[in-house]
Amino acid sequence: MKGARFLMFTAVMFAGCATEEPTNLLEAYEEVDATTILDAPSAIPGTFAPAHRGRVARGEYMVELLGCGVCHTDGALVGDPDFERSLAGSATGIAYMKPMGEEHPGVVYPANITPDDETGIGTWTDQQIANAIRAGIGRHGDQRIASMPWQGYARISDDDVDAIVSYLRSIKAVRHKVPDKVEPGDRATHPFVYFGVYRSKP
Ligand code: HEC
């Protein structure tokens, strides 16, 4: 990117209840459009998980490789994952608008993807889970999932997505309800991070 110096904030933490006007520490920087930084690079043709792995083990390998737990495990977004509740959703959300520009940006909380019926994906069909992973389609078919990097997962093969689904169904169901999505303009009651890319101003 033209040799510019970049400063990347992967975990800028915002409390939902700031009272004072914050000093702008980013005055000397300008923001770069970061809408695609979360996209995973496309798979290199010919690289496959070892063929001898069983389907569930292969799914586990894929989930680790694709970093699902980075968002879907509580605390992981702020560097302190709660492994007891692996993949059971995060109470730290992700702002999908610029918090520097929007006083109250929209925020989504990474879902509980353990097989709990009430708070996880226990009652989702295989197809619904696969659609969420590869196409970012929410359970009701219409809604695009914000902040989940599904564009980077769009070309996962049927076999691999089946393996991921099998693995997710095999893990311990954890009851853990994540905070509801926050609409733009509403005040978040739980903390959230913002993924942004900045470069020093000329
Ligand atoms: C960068 C963060 C991030 C990563 C990495 C990520 N997700 Fe997500 N995912 C989210 C967020 C945020 C949501 C909720 C979006 C919403 O509510 O609009 C979500 C939603 C989902 C859903 C829908 C569940 C529901 O109840 O809405 C599934 C299934 C899912 N993710 C599976 C995965 C899998 C499998 C992986 C790894 C291959 C993965 N995610 C990686 C952030 C992430």
Image (cartoon, rainbow, N blue to C red):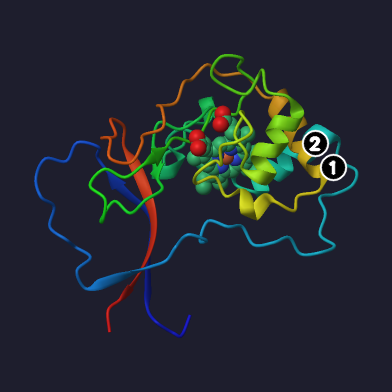
The amino acid marked with disc number 2 is: Asp
Q: Position of residue 63 (x, y in %)?
A: 67, 41
The number of discs equals: 2
Q: Could you say which is closer to the camera, residue 102 or residue 115?
A: 102
Labelled disc at residue 148: none
Marking on residue 159: 1
Q: Is residue 69 among the parts visible in the rendering? A: no
* Disc 1 secondary structure class: helix
Picture coordinates of residue 178 (x, y %)?
A: 44, 26
For mark 2, give the secondary structure: helix
Q: Nearer the viewer, residue 161 or 172?
A: 161
Write down the residue under mark 2. Answer: 162
Q: How would you rate the neighbour count of disc 2 (Cα within 10 Å): few for under 14, some for 14-19, many for 20 or more?
A: many
Residue at 25% from the left image edge and 37% from the top image edge: 16
* Contact between labelled residues 2 and 1, with CB atoms less than 8 Å apart: yes
Q: Residue at x 31, y 37 (%)?
A: 191
Q: Is residue 84 visible?
A: yes
| Image quarter of residue 78 | top left
- 199 and 87: which one is in front? 199
> Three-letter amino acid code at disc 1?
Asp
Q: Position of residue 139 (x, y in %)?
A: 62, 29
Alpha-carbon distance for marks 1 and 2?
Answer: 5 Å
Residue at screen point 66% across, 45% down: 135
Graded by Cα atoms within 10 Å as few (under 14), some (14 to 19) or many (20 or more), the crowding at tag 1 reads: few
Quadrant for ligand 1 reads: top right
Residue that appears at 70% across and 31% down:
128
